[in-house]
Amino acid sequence: MQREVPHPTLTDMIRISAALFAIFLFCLPAVSATVNILALGDSLTAGYGLDPKDAFPVKLEAALKANGHDVKVVNAGVSGDTAAAGLARLDWSLTGDISAVIVELGANDALRGLDPKQAEAALDQILTRIGAKGLPVLVAGMQAPRNMGKDYVAAFDPIFQRLAEKHKTLLYPFFLDGVAADPKLNQPDGLHPTAEGIDMIVARILPRVEELVGQASAK
């Protein structure tokens, strides 16, 4: 006579499902919650004339961590870079572990009196490429030196807000807000912030960067 095999009860099925789910979770690769921010910029990002520990990306990372964020800020600042130069090295700067980007470019375009349309076109392409990767962006705006004349200022200054609206990115209107033209916060060249100037920049831009971190974490 053939022995009847008992059917599993609902409790047995729940236990089996729970065990299989636990095995599935155990086999998943570890995923880091760290938000890796690429700071793409020029000498203002790179830390020209400063001790490496006083560069903007380093101090920004420290400030974010002090506020409880698990972040790493990658210094992709190159002294002398125009917006076009930043575009030229964008692809190899955007490694696979980047979670968000701060774009701080345009100051050298204005200092050299380059056509604002040229800077806008390069920045537009930068934001388009970053957007294609689905990464959140904070545009750090710049203002033209006032000695360039009213017409140049009127053509240059609105670039950043216009692009931020077009690409639906976060915007910090003026990277050097509170620092520009203050001798106490700038190096002797009058262009590059001192360590204290960087502290001011970090303190003022921090809320916007925290929004950026929030957007990256949500993804």
Image: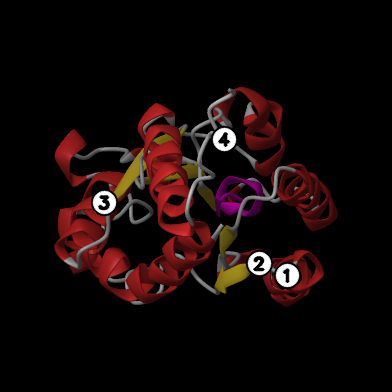
Instruction: Judge the density around disc 3: few (<14), some (14-19), many (≥20) Cα neighbours within 10 Å.
Output: many
Q: Find residue 110 and report its horizontal and vertical position in percent.
A: 64, 54
Which SS class for mark 3?
A: helix
Q: Position of residue 207 (x, y in %)?
A: 37, 76
Q: How is the image coloured?
A: secondary structure
Residue matched to label 2: 169
Q: N-terminal of the two: label 2 or label 4?
A: 4
Q: Amino acid at mark 3?
A: Glu
Amino acid carrying mark 4 in the image:
Asp
If the image is split into quadrants, where does the C terminus sit?
A: bottom right
- Specify the label residue 54 is tagged with: none
The residue at the point 33 percent across, 70 percent down is: 206
Q: Which mark is residue 61?
A: 3
Magenta-drawn segment: 103-110
Identify the residue shown where x is 38% and y is 40%: 19
Disc 1 to disc 3: CB gap under 8 Å: no
In front of the other: 4 or 198: 4
Q: CB under 8 Å between callouts 1 and 2?
A: yes
Per the rendering, the mark at residue 168 is 1
C-alpha gap between disc 1 and disc 3:
24 Å
Asked if the stretch drawn in magenta spans residue 6, the answer is no
For the N terminus, which image quadrant? Answer: top right
Visible residue check, residue 181: no
Mark closer to the chain start, 1 or 3: 3
Among the two numbered marks 3 and 2 on one chain, the one whose residue lies closer to the N terminus:
3
